[in-house]
Amino acid sequence: MTRTSLKIGPLPDKTPQKLTVLVDPPLAADLDDYARIHSEIHGTEVPAAALVPLMLETFLASDSGFRRARKS
């Protein structure tokens, strides 16, 4: 497999809080594919549900409008 780089690296240890989210089937399939590729790259099987919080964290950190609104 070619060396692929994903925005989400190995998972850090964190104490999670439960949040239930419903997604459409195409998004669920994309998340499962992402988790499969992530697992292949990092050598550790990780379910999609474990990656979603990091995806959301990355998205919020990259949203400059959110950061500005939050400061005000």
Image (spheres, rainbow, N blue to C red):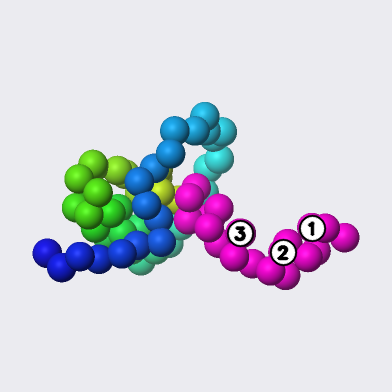
Instruction: Decide which of 28, 9 is in the foreground and name it.
Output: 9
Q: Look at the picture and state if 68 lies above or below 35.
A: below
Does residue 6 appear left or right of residue 69 in this picture?
A: left
Judged from this view, the residue extending furthest toward the left is 1
How much space separates mark 2 and mark 3, taking CA atoms?
8 Å
Which residue does the numbered mark 3 point to in the structure image? 61
For the residue marked with disc 3, what is the amino acid?
Ala
For the residue marked with disc 2, what is the amino acid?
Phe
For the residue marked with disc 1, what is the amino acid?
Arg
Task: Answer whether residue 51 is magenta in the image.
Answer: no
Does residue 54 appear left or right of residue 25 in this picture?
A: right
Which residue does the numbered mark 2 point to in the structure image? 66
Across and down, in percent, residue 1 comes to 12, 64
**Label 1 near label 2: C-beta < 8 Å?**
yes
Which sits earlier in the primary sequence, circle 3 or circle 1?
3
Q: Look at the picture and state if 45 lies above or below 31.
A: above
How much space separates mark 2 and mark 1, taking CA atoms?
6 Å
Which residue does the numbered mark 1 point to in the structure image? 70
Q: What residue lies at 82% left-to-right and 58% top-to-bottom? A: 71
